[in-house]
Amino acid sequence: RSPFLYRTKPILEKCRAGLYENTPDHHAILGGCSIAGLYFANGFSGLGVMHSPATGRALSEIMLDGKASFLDVSCLNLTRFATGELLHETAFI
């Protein structure tokens, strides 16, 4: 515990906050949906920046070719929530 923090007043102009998003199975959503031209690349929680190069490549391939060829990301589809095929984390680092 840090009692001095109770007396500290934050400088709101210097405070930053952001949304830490999660999906029900704690895995990203990547790919299209039933609405033509609408694609998802979200749900990465705090890891989005680290995954952004691969996400960008995979999503561009999905948009152009209908699937990602360099990496199989089909398990990250949006429909897994409706079908109950949630992913299970086997090694969280």
Image (tube, rainbow, N blue to C red):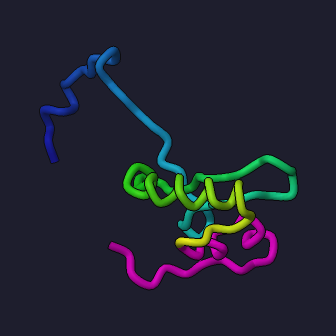
Give me the residue at 71% from left, 80% from top.
Answer: 85
Q: Is residue 78 magenta?
A: yes
Q: In screen coordinates, is 48 left or right of 73?
A: left
Give me the residue at 32% from left, 72% from top.
Answer: 93
Q: In screen coordinates, is 78 left or right of 55?
A: right
Furthest-bottom residue in view? 90
Q: Is residue 91 magenta?
A: yes
Give me the residue at 80% from left, 76% from top.
Answer: 83
Image coordinates for residue 50, horizontal then vertical, percent: 37, 55
Image coordinates for residue 68, horizontal then vertical, percent: 62, 68
Tell me the quarter of the picture where residue 32 sits: bottom right
Image coordinates for residue 1, horizontal then vertical, percent: 16, 48
Give me the residue at 19% from left, 25% from top.
Answer: 7
Q: Relative to residue 54, is residue 5 depicted above or below? A: above
Q: Which residues are magenta?
A: 71-93
Q: Main secondary structure of the magenta part?
A: loop
